[in-house]
Every structure is written in structure tokens, then in C-alpha cells.
Image: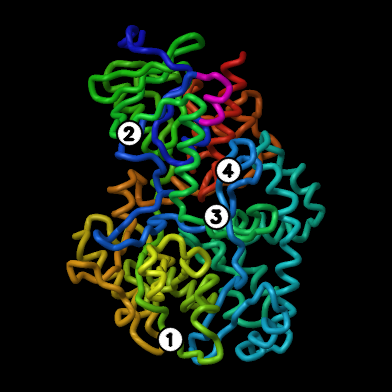
């Protein structure tokens, strides 16, 4: 028997208040399901928040996540979210690491200018055509796959048939991504531009046999059915604020400052699970986990240690995580008095920073950076991706900052696995990584970036770095893994059991009454709401049985 039979019973209790949890809560509450969300922090939104990092500075930054691609229009429309997403004119700018006075600017509105930019850098005169052909070749992935992510899981063979291109399926799903990139492009720099989509938050070589890079690549090129990455007007916090609004209006109960310490899953049909917050207990017919699977295991272990049996019938018969999550990134937020000058005088900073600014990201550099980090060292040079939110959406800055020409920069460093900071002095490790990132960036600028930093009223520079250790500490992400573990293919194997609602929707766990609703769900990852939507659909089926 479970320990507490007098605690209030909800239909659904959701552990964690990230954006996926809010999506699930909104869908459930709209159907009259009595739902409670339990969030450790003083606010909901998880990593999808906007904050003022520097006291006295009127700049509201998307502190952790920054762009939107995988949030389906279906969720926006069904929940009635007042969210505006802006399409960026420029896809990317990539300085040539061997000669930063030239670079490739991919202009979505001007194919002729893009071709001329390729011609200035690429050794092959046909490289621009190859890049365009590669983009056209992978477009069917988005068209075929994205509509399925808010439906019950399709089988792999069905997705393959829908795609209608066995060669593309083999290149993306069966062979390491690096092979396709070597065959598609002649130039190392072009291969690197494409490879970066497979390495955001993912620690892998281009030829990694695990295909981690392939799965990451797939999620980065299917968003919205086009693969475009958009800027949320008002910052990422606007997305979470809208989700909070619709969840509350639907009747969901949102409790912040409430840390879940243990979970005792129900023993069988008709029983309630117990969610423990210290001595306080909430009982629920179903539990949705917005925290990562590794955190969920810890909570269940704590519940079992308190005397409850597990859903598998033993006192502690848990299914352990096969791999401890490990994030692989550094996030740096900056406020600048102005954009820095480039060594490439043919491209304006306003164009270069309006898309994704790639630094030291040729395929060879990316694989070398992986090797260096796998050996325990900080890559030199450190591969970087940079975004300027304020060029697309100046509303995140106060009027005085806008009038003065200030801008935000978000720097995202690749191949910075958690092992480089784990167990080390957090300040020293952070400083070392930040120094490496700034050195890498300065190599392609005509002036040091530090000379463009704004200062706070106390005289400190407006720059902050967030390591995987910082994410683990502040957001509870084990290993600072933004995906809560390795990404999975967004379909079911042909022989995989799909005999329950939880399995059909890709949200099941080892416990019948506990579902994943966060990034750890089958089609989780990024700011998408997909995990929350699918968990809610599974829960509605289960509650209706």
C-alpha cells in the first residue's frame, strides 16, 4: 500500500514547470482534468525564459534558449497563444578561418548575392550550387516528418515510405552524417556549415558510429516543415508567459517554489501515485515528468527508499539510465554598445550577425575540436555559433538602449562536454571556457569584442557565461544536457510494441502511471512543446479508459 491515503487527489500531477509541462497542463485543464504543476523555482518556464542578467540594465535576454523552430503551429493555434515568430532574412555568415577577410553570407532573399559570396571563399566554383542542391535534397525530410510529431508514433518503414527516397533515408538514418557531407560538398567550410546542425548540444564526430549527430541534424532541419529557425518577439520568455497564461485560464494549478523530493508510483490500476515535497504529499491518478529521465529515476528511488514498492513489483526494481546525460555546450550572453567591426569589409555586421554567425566551424575543425575535448582539453580554436536577437526584435531592449544602438549577442560554443567542468572549481572552469570563446571570436573580428561590451551601473561588463555545471545547478539538468539525454529518432521501430497509449505517443516510462512530458520524451528536445502535447494526449486516453 502507498503510505498516504488522505492527501488530495488530482487527476494529473506534473513534476517541473518548464514549457512542455505548461503545454501539457493547458491541454489537460481545457478538458476538465484536475491538474497541478509543481515547480522548484520561483517561476515557471524552465530554460525557456527571459531575464535581466545585469541589475539596472534594461535588457531582457532569452537566457538559455533563444530560437524557435520545432514549436508546431498546431499547438500555437489550438492553445490560442499570442506568440509572434520572425523569420530571419540571413541564414548564416561564416568567415573563412584561413583568411577571415572573406566569408560566406547566405542571404535567403538574394540567391545571386549568396552565390557571389560562395565564389569569394570556396575553391570550387560550383559550391554554391551544391549547397542549394543539398538544401533541396533534405527538404522532403521536413515535409514528411514534421506533421507526424504531434500524432501517435509512425513505424520506421512507414516514414521511409512517406519520404520516398531510399538514398536520403540511408544517408541520414543509417550512415554517419559525415559521409553524406563529404559526398555533397567539395569544400571543408561548406561541410562545416551543414554539420553544425548535427552538433548543437551534442558531443560527436562527423563520422560517429552512434549516429548521435544524425539524430540531432534531423531535428534541426525539420522544424515547421521547412527547417527554419525563428526569433520569438519579446524573447523566449514571451512563449512561456503565454503558455502560463493559457494553462492558468484553463484551470490548471501552478505551484512555484515547490521542490519534489520523491515519487512513489502507483502499484496498479485504480491506485494513485504519490508526489512528495518533503513531508507534503500530492496524490494523482497520473504523473507527468517534465524533468529528465535521470532525475525521475532519482525521485522514484527516493520514493522506494521510503517504503513504497515500484511499479515493476519489487521494492526497488528500477530500470536504470543506460548512459548518464552529458551536455556539450557553453552559453554566453552579452550586451554590446554597438556591433563589432568584421575583418571582412565586404559584409556589414548588421547582415553577418542577423543570421547564425559561424566561427571556426569547418568540418575538419569540428572533428578536431571533438578530439581535443574527448582528450580532456578545451578545443583551440573553440567552435562557436553567434546570434543577435535584437537585430530582429529590438523590443527586448529598453528605449534608451535601442536609441543608443545597443545590441545583444548570444554565443553558443560547441564541443564543450560536461566532463571539462565536472568536479572542477566552477568559477575557474567558467573563466577558462569564456576566455577560449572570446579568443575564437576575436580571431574573425577587426577589434576585440570586449571593447564593445556595455557596462552595468556598478561598472561590471555586461557578459555572462553559463556552463553545463551552471545548467545542472540552476535548472536541474543532469550533466547540463539540454536534451535530457540522447535524442531518439522521431518514429517507432517496426517491431516496437505500441500496445498502450504511453507507447503510441512515445512518452512511456518503466512505470505505468508515469509519463514523460519534457525533452526526454521520444520527440522531445528544443523549445517545441511536442513532449507536453503528446503526454497530454496519452494521459487523456488513459484517463478516459
Secondary structure at badge 3 equals: loop
How far from the left and from the top, in percent, is residue 50?
39, 53
Task: Work out whether mark 3 precedes mark 1 in sequence or the reverse, and give the earlier one.
Answer: 3
What residue did someone put label 4 on? 523
- The residue closer to the viewer here, 421 or 407, is 407
- What residue is shown at x 47% (from left), y 65% (from top)? 394
Q: Which mark is residue 341?
A: 1
Vertical order, 275 against 352 (above or below): above
Q: Dot 3: few (<14), some (14–19), or many (≥20) neighbours within 10 Å?
A: many
Q: CA distance from mark 2 to mark 1?
A: 44 Å
How far from the left and from the top, in percent, is residue 438?
34, 76
Task: Work out whether mark 4 precedes mark 3 in sequence or the reverse, and give the earlier one.
Answer: 3
Q: Dot 2: few (<14), some (14–19), or many (≥20) neighbours within 10 Å?
A: some
What range is drawn magenta here? 26-33
Instruction: Say if mark 4 contacts mark 3, CB within 8 Å.
Output: no
**Front of the two marks 4 and 3:** 3
Secondary structure at badge 2 equals: loop
Secondary structure at badge 4 equals: loop
Instruction: Say if mark 2 contacts mark 1, CB within 8 Å.
Output: no
Q: Quadrant of the C terminus?
A: top right
Q: Quadrant of the N terminus?
A: top left
Q: Is residue 32 magenta?
A: yes
Secondary structure mostly seen in the magenta stretch:
helix
Q: Which mark is residue 68?
A: 3
Q: CA distance from mark 3 to mark 1?
A: 28 Å
Instruction: Say if mark 2 contacts mark 3, CB within 8 Å.
Output: no
What residue did someone put label 2 on? 256
Which picture quadrant has residue 309? top left
452 sits left or right of 156 in the view: left
- The residue closer to the viewer here, 47 or 287, is 47
Amino acid at each position: 500500500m502507498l503510505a498516504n491515503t488522505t492527501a488530495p487527489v488530482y487527476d494529473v500531477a506534473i513534476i517541473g514547470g518548464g514549457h512542455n509541462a505548461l503545454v501539457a497542463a493547458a491541454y489537460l485543464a481545457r478538458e476538465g482534468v484536475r491538474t497541478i504543476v509543481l515547480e522548484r523555482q520561483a517561476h515557471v518556464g524552465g530554460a525557456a525564459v527571459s531575464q535581466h542578467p545585469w541589475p539596472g540594465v534594461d535588457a531582457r535576454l532569452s537566457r538559455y534558449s533563444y530560437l524557435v523552430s520545432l514549436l508546431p503551429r498546431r499547438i500555437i493555434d489550438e492553445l490560442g497563444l499570442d506568440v509572434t515568430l520572425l523569420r530571419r532574412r540571413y541564414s548564416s555568415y561564416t568567415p573563412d578561418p584561413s583568411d577571415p577577410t572573406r566569408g560566406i553570407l547566405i542571404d535567403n532573399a538574394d540567391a545571386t548575392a549568396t552565390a557571389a559570396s560562395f565564389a569569394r571563399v570556396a575553391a570550387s566554383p560550383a559550391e554554391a550550387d551544391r549547397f542549394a542542391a543539398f538544401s533541396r535534397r533534405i527538404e522532403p525530410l521536413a515535409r514528411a516528418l514534421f506533421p507526424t510529431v504531434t500524432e501517435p508514433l509512425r513505424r520506421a518503414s512507414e516514414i521511409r515510405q512517406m519520404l520516398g527516397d531510399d538514398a536520403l533515408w540511408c544517408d541520414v538514418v543509417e550512415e554517419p552524417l559525415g559521409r553524406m557531407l563529404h559526398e555533397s560538398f567539395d569544400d571543408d567550410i561548406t561541410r562545416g556549415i551543414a554539420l553544425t546542425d548535427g552538433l548543437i548540444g551534442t558531443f560527436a564526430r562527423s563520422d560517429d558510429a552512434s549516429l548521435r549527430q544524425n539524430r540531432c541534424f534531423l531535428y534541426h532541419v525539420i522544424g515547421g516543415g521547412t527547417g527554419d529557425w525563428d526569433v520569438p518577439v519579446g524573447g523566449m520568455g514571451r512563449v512561456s508567459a503565454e503558455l502560463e497564461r493559457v494553462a492558468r485560464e484553463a484551470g490548471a494549478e501552478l505551484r512555484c517554489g515547490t521542490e519534489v523530493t520523491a515519487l512513489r508510483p502507483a502499484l496498479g490500476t485504480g491506485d494513485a501515485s504519490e508526489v512528495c515535497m518533503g513531508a507534503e504529499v500530492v496524490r494523482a491518478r497520473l504523473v507527468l515528468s517534465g524533468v529528465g529521465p535521470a532525475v525521475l529515476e532519482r525521485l522514484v528511488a527516493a520514493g522506494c527508499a521510503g517504503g513504497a514498492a515500484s511499479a515493476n513489483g519489487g521494492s526497488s526494481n528500477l530500470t536504470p539510465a543506460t548512459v548518464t546525460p552529458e551536455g556539450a555546450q557553453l552559453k554566453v550572453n552579452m550586451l554590446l554598445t554597438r556591433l563589432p567591426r568584421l575583418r571582412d569589409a565586404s559584409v556589414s555586421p548588421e547582415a553577418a550577425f542577423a543570421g547564425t554567425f559561424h566561427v571556426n566551424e569547418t568540418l575538419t575543425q569540428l572533428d578536431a575540436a571533438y578530439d581535443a575535448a574527448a582528450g580532456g582539453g578545451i578545443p583551440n580554436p573553440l567552435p562557436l555559433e553567434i546570434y543577435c536577437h535584437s537585430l530582429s526584435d529590438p523590443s527586448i531592449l529598453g528605449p534608451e538602449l535601442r536609441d543608443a544602438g545597443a545590441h545583444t549577442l548570444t554565443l553558443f560554443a560547441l564541443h564543450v562536454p560536461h566532463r571539462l567542468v565536472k568536479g572542477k572549481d566552477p568559477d575557474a572552469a567558467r573563466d577558462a571556457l569564456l576566455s577560449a570563446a572570446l579568443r575564437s571570436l576575436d580571431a574573425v573580428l577587426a577589434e576585440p569584442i570586449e571593447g564593445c561590451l556595455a557596462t552595468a551601473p556598478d561598472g561590471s561588463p555586461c557578459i555572462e557565461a553559463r556552463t553545463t555545471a551552471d545548467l545542472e545547478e540552476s535548472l536541474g539538468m543532469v550533466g547540463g544536457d539540454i536534451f535530457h539525454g540522447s535524442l531518439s529518432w522521431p518514429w517507432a521501430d517496426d517491431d516496437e510494441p505500441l500496445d498502450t497509449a504511453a507507447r503510441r505517443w512515445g512518452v512511456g516510462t518503466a512505470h505505468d502511471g508515469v509519463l514523460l512530458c519534457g525533452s526526454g520524451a521520444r520527440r522531445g528536445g528544443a523549445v517545441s512543446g511536442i513532449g507536453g502535447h503528446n503526454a497530454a494526449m496519452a494521459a487523456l486516453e488513459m484517463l478516459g479508459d
